[in-house]
Amino acid sequence: TGLRNIPSPPKKPFVGNMLTVDKETPLQSLMQLARELGPIIRLDMMGTPMVVVSGASLVQEICDESRFDKAVRGSLRRVRSAAGDGLFTAYTQENNWTKAHNILLPTFAQRAMAGYLPLMYDIASQLCMKWERLNADDDIDVVHDMTALALDTVGVCGFDYRFNSFYRRDYHPFIDALTRTLETCMVQRGLPFEKMILRKRLDQLKTDVAFMSKLVDDIVRERRRGGGDQAQKDLLNFMLAGVDKTTGESLSDENIRYQIITFLIAGHETTSGLMSFALYFLVNNPDVLEKAYEEVDRVLGTDIGVMPTIAEVNHLTYVQQVLNEALRLWPTAPAIGLYPYRDEVIGGQYKIKKNTFVTLLTLMLHRDPSVWGAEPETFNPDNFSREAEASRPAHAFKPWGNGQRACIGRQFAMQEATLVLGMILQRFQLFDHQRYQLRVKETMSIKPDGFRIRVKARPGRT
Ligand code: HEM
């Protein structure tokens, strides 16, 4: 019939391929397997099959939304204990997904972004001010500072709340609760006796979720009562006022809470990872750094006392190419989960049964030589020149996920990252004083573990 078996690594009795995948770095294990076995792999996770797809032509097929849907399973499903039926963790079939999608889409559209710019600038200025006051021999923990920045930005743009991460040594207690919650969702693997072994963690999870819910509920209640800044153009006011045109309904307070927690989850690690990887690539590619400085000096000038306009940020096209190329090599949402509605055959030869968990391994899709050429591991922002983008096949670049379930915060994240990189380049020389060797740490997303730099103010800035 022309059907072929999907290549699989050797299995062990009972656990199948569970041990084939490293506990600390599962995605990097999958990358290795894809390198050895090719664009499609089948794993046996203790009796449950998992198909891993990373070749561009096969990815094109699984991105067909009439055949495949987002899978909310495994750790993502466990995140529902905190984020409920918020956009990220909702099933596509849930009413609240459609309703919230319709209400929230315009609030994240390009047009709405201008309103967030002054708030993003406020937080980015705090980062720059911190860096300006460092001594020449002070190290910057890049991931820490970028996480602080990303969180504070979502807090203030989302619901006018200041985590004030640059005014404290540790993270705000909300963030510790959120980080612990995500860790607990990640470490569970549905193994026997797990509930007993992880009892302490699971108790802590309840405490943490209760704490986060109360903080958010208090903000929502206060705003409903007429407190807070009613004229503030933040996401919360949009959510309180928004009506779904097709049903005439608005979001419940419970769902608004879930959305706020969702924005913090979705906007914190991914955006901070993107900016961290971009800085890593900049200090390692002097030619690229030079070009980026050139563009920033041309577009933003040397006057660091004024806020860049939205037009200026949009004109930092080379900086955006750097960000896109960072997202190509280390997409900070490194994989997405899908499942087929019906029994499927993809690539004309690989059978995938209805409902099978299919992982789109973005990390390896972005290294497919049929799309990116013979040296896909090389960092090269020219991959995102206008011409290169126009000639690339659809679905070859998927850092934002797919179709209707793709990232709603894409413009938000890109605007923030472009502004921040622009402001950093406008002000600072960057030093890779420890000659950092990339080590990728995996949590819900990925980050350059232990990456530190030093900075010095560029001369002639006023
Ligand atoms: C969904 C990536 C920033 C909010 C997604 C998905 C990806 C992604 C791949 C699809 C997930 C899946 O299929 O399971 C990223 C990256 C970011 C980023 C790489 C930064 C560089 C943000 C920000 C926000 C956000 C800043 C909000 C403030 C969301 C939401 C969803 C989502 C709500 C779910 C959308 C839906 O299913 O309706 N993101 N994201 N993201 N993202 Fe982002």
Image (tube, rainbow, N blue to C red):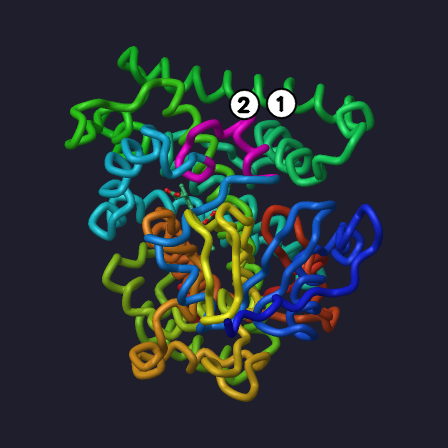
Question: On the image, which quarter does residue 433 sit in?
Answer: bottom right
Residue 126 colored in magenta in the image: no
Give the residue at mark 2: 212
- The Cα–Cα distance between marks 2 and 1, rounded to whole angstroms, is 6 Å
Q: Are marks 2 and 1 in contact (CB under 8 Å)?
A: yes
Question: On the image, which quarter does residue 103 sit in?
Answer: top left
Give the residue at mark 1: 208
Q: Position of residue 238 (x, y in %)?
A: 25, 31
Which mark, residue 24? none
Residue 85 colored in magenta in the image: yes
Please give left or right for residue 236 compared with residue 198 in the image.
left
**Which stretch is magenta?**
75-89
Please, what is the three-letter code of the amino acid marked with disc 2? Answer: Met
| Vertical arrangement, residue 444 with respect to residue 134, above or below | above
What secondary structure is found at the residue carrying circle 1? helix
Callout 2 crowding tier (Cα within 10 Å): few <14, some 14–19, many ≥20: some
Could one spot residue 57 in this view of the protein? yes
- Residue visible at 61% across and 39% down in the picture: 75
